[in-house]
Image: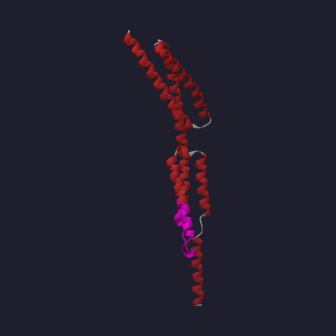
Amino acid sequence: MTTLVKIAALSVAVLVVSSCAKVPEVELENAKKAVEELKAVEANRYMAAEFNAIQDSLNAANVAIETEKSRFFLVRNYDAPKSKLVNVVTIAEELKAKNEEKKAQVREEAQQNIEAVNQLIAENKDLLKKAPRGKEGKAALEAIQSDIATIEASVNEVNTLISNGDYLTAKDKSAALKAKAESIKEELNQAIAKTKKRK
């Protein structure tokens, strides 16, 4: 009887250990899916640091699972990687909401830049009329006029990017256009100021 009790107790112990040492496949799939969904909404672009951190957590959990798999089955324990995987899913959900906020913010910045660029284009065209038109200035003014036309065409490209949902590229391009338009305004103002001094 004693031997039977020992065998039964051992069987229960093995059963408990083996049930605890089950590979967290469902949690792993859920975590992978959560990270893929984040990438699908471009969190890897808009929240690169946070996305990389969650990707690192998933990779670390994967490594921990493989490490446990290589151990003797009676001492395997997947609690730590399982907990990490559950955490990945939780953080991914939070990041998804934050990512939408970030995208809206970036879109707003791109639109504000474009409004500023359109205003600068109008101002630069007015300044162009007042700019000195001597022999030396003619070539420079033609180059500036060409630059303004290029900026105008690029504004349409940025608006298309915004319509297509590529807010990050739109923000970068619109910021560059704004800087260029501001530079032209400064150049024209300096040319006009020099002419006034000569008079």
Q: Position of residue 3 (x, y in %)?
A: 58, 89
The residue lying toward the viewer, choosing from 150 and 120, is 150
Q: Residue at x 52, y 64 (%)?
A: 80
Q: Residue furthest top?
A: 199
Residue 119 screen position, x and y as percent: 51, 22
| In the depicted structure, whether residue 135 falls above or below residue 166 | above
Residue 175 vs 126, above or below: the answer is below
Q: Please, what is the dominant secondary structure of the magenta stretch?
A: helix
- Using the image as rendered, state which of residue 196 and residue 7 is in the foreground: 196
Give the number of callouts: 0
Q: Residue furthest front?
A: 135
* Residue at image point 48% right, 12% down: 135
Q: Is residue 144 above or below residue 96?
A: above
Q: Give the vertical position of 36 relative to 148 (above or below).
A: below
Quarter-wise, where is residue 41 in the image?
Answer: top right
Residue 121 placement, left or right of 25: left
Residue in view at x 39 percent, y 12 percent: 196
Decide whether residue 128 is among the magenta residues. no
Q: Is residue 108 visible?
A: no
Q: Which residues are magenta?
A: 60-83
Percent position of residue 50, x then y: 50, 49
Q: Residue at x 59, y 79 (%)?
A: 12
- Which corner quadrant holds the C terminus? top left
Give the image quarter of residue 77. Answer: bottom right
In the rendered image, is residue 15 in sight?
A: yes
